[in-house]
Amino acid sequence: MTQQRNALVTGSTRGIGAAMAEALAADGCNVMLSGFGEADAIEAERNRLADTYKVEVLYNDADLSNEDDVDALADATVSAFGGIDILVNNAVFRHFHIIDDFPRDEWRHALAVNVTAPFILTQRALPGMKARDWGRIVNFSSVMGLAGRSGRADYITSKHAMLGLTRATAAEVGEIENITCNAVCPGSVLTPNTEIKIGELAEQRGISFEDAKVAYLEIRGQKIDYITPERVAKLIIFLCQDSSIDITGATIPIDQGRSATWLEM
């Protein structure tokens, strides 16, 4: 159980992050939401989580590309809850360019959100975790943190970097029994961002959305179906529980065996 723990989940207003926020709240954890979206919709969801699970749920609109905002997010979480027991670095920004044409401002923006913000939040969360002798950090990498794909240099570089940050963090807290840091590597998850790409594929090919869903999965080399955000969230809950204490510095694919069987595809 993560009951009475305090969690900060970035990118938690939609997709996988929203599923993680709900799972943590359902497990008795106070949650700081962080992400973008319509203010009224975010407030409604914040209220729903708090009322349904009888925990404290707050929201901060930090721009994770701005280091001052990242520090302010950490400060707000500590001020509200007294500390950060669980940090889930999930937020990500994606651009789609080949390296020859990649605008440098977009490169800097992606690396700021995807790598620098997780580093700062880890830096800010660790002292309190060490003082309380308990902490869980979960970093989001991807199957594309395990290989490469053209036109995705910022995303692939970021997701490889998250594996390095995970291992470095785990090494630094290796002698503290109750603090762990792990990385998860999801395959194709049916999120709002994925649905946008499916819609684009449908338009390009002149096919229905449902047919494009099948085609998109085939292109990605995932054989069964899309992974649901809720199943990813269950893995994160396990990594935050005391029963996972022996798992740290790990890279954990949740991809239906995709990254283990690329040679067969």
Image (cartoon, rainbow, N blue to C red):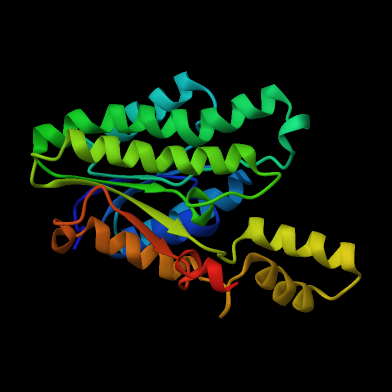
Q: How many circles with numbers are drawn on the protein?
A: 0
Quadrant (top left/top right/bottom left/bottom right) for the C terminus: bottom right
Q: Is residue 38 left or right of residue 3?
A: right
Quadrant (top left/top right/bottom left/bottom right) for the N terminus: bottom left
Instruction: Please state which of residues 6 and 154 is positioned toward the viewer in this rendering.
Output: 154
Residue at 14 percent of width and 56 percent of height: 245
Which quadrant would residue 58 be assigned to in this image? top left
Image location (x, y in percent) of residue 60: 46, 36
The answer to whether 172 is drawn above or below residue 181 in the figure is above
Quick one: which residue is furthest to the top in this view?
A: 68
Instruction: Please state which of residues 86 and 171 is positioned toward the viewer in this rendering.
Output: 171
Q: Is residue 52 visible?
A: no
Q: Is residue 229 left or right of residue 265?
A: left
Residue at 79 percent of width and 73 percent of height: 209
Image location (x, y in percent) of residue 95: 68, 40
Q: Is residue 247 visible?
A: yes
Image location (x, y in percent) of residue 234: 35, 67
The answer to whether 108 is drawn above or below residue 263 in the figure is above
Residue at 71 percent of width and 33 percent of height: 99
Residue at 34 percent of width and 65 percent of height: 235
Instruction: Please state which of residues 94 and 1 is positioned toward the viewer in this rendering.
Output: 94
Image location (x, y in percent) of residue 180: 20, 47
